Image (cartoon, helix red, strand yellow):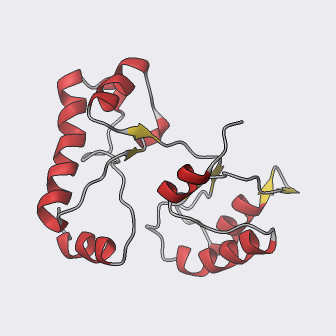
Amino acid sequence: RQFPETVRAIVADGHELGNHTLSHKDITKLSDDEVGAEVDAVETFVKDAAGATTKPWYRAPFLAALDHVEGILRERCYRPVWMTIYSGDDKTGVKSDDIVRAVEEDHGKPRRLERGAILLFHGSQPENLTALPKVLDWIHDQGFAVLPLGDAMRIAKPR
């Protein structure tokens, strides 16, 4: 809510938005009404600030989920998004090299990127500005492209 101009700029640049709740609380510990209020508040703000929507994408804080909570979200036309690779960029004191290593390695061994991978970045660390170009180069070096989630989901083939 503090930065409506940022939301407008993101939308103007053609990026997709998703909903991650207003307060970033564990929604599995909230009442059904509170869950609805969390996502509705974000959706209303985005509509008011930028004339855009967060639908259909939603990612639960802490990746916390319960079937009945996902039902509430489905009723509001949200589709949950998970992740396959965690960058660790939200850890206190994380450095650029740590972020790159978390993406490029799996338990100390080189990671082989798979089609449809979703990388989780928070973007809240200045270290991301150094790490992200390296990660993008790594993705491209493996023969993959970075796509908006909606585009990736439209071309994905079911397994």
Vertical side of 152 occupied by 146: above or below: below
The extreme left residue here reads 48
Instruction: Estimate the x, y position of residue 78 in percent, counting from the top left.
Output: 35, 39
Q: Quarter of the image holding residue 140?
A: bottom right
* Label total for image: 0
Instruction: Estimate the x, y position of residue 39 in percent, counting from the top left.
Output: 24, 41
- Answer with left or right where residue 124 lies relative to residue 108: left
Q: Quadrant of the N terminus?
A: bottom left
- Answer with left or right where residue 65 lies relative to residue 142: left
- Answer with left or right where residue 145 lies relative to residue 68: right
Residue nearer the viewer, 3 or 56: 56
Residue at 85 percent of width and 55 percent of height: 108
Vertical side of 123 occupied by 83: above or below: above
- Answer with left or right where residue 142 lies relative to residue 18: right
Vertical side of 146 occupied by 91: above or below: above
Residue at 66 percent of width and 52 percent of height: 117
The extreme top residue here reads 68
Residue at 80 percent of width and 58 percent of height: 105
Residue nearer the viewer, 48 or 85: 48
Instruction: Estimate the x, y position of residue 70 in percent, counting from the top left.
Output: 38, 27
Instruction: Estimate the x, y position of residue 45 in percent, counting from the top left.
Output: 15, 56
Q: Quadrant of the C terminus?
A: top right
Residue at 23 percent of width and 73 percent of height: 8
Residue nearer the viewer, 120 or 51: 51
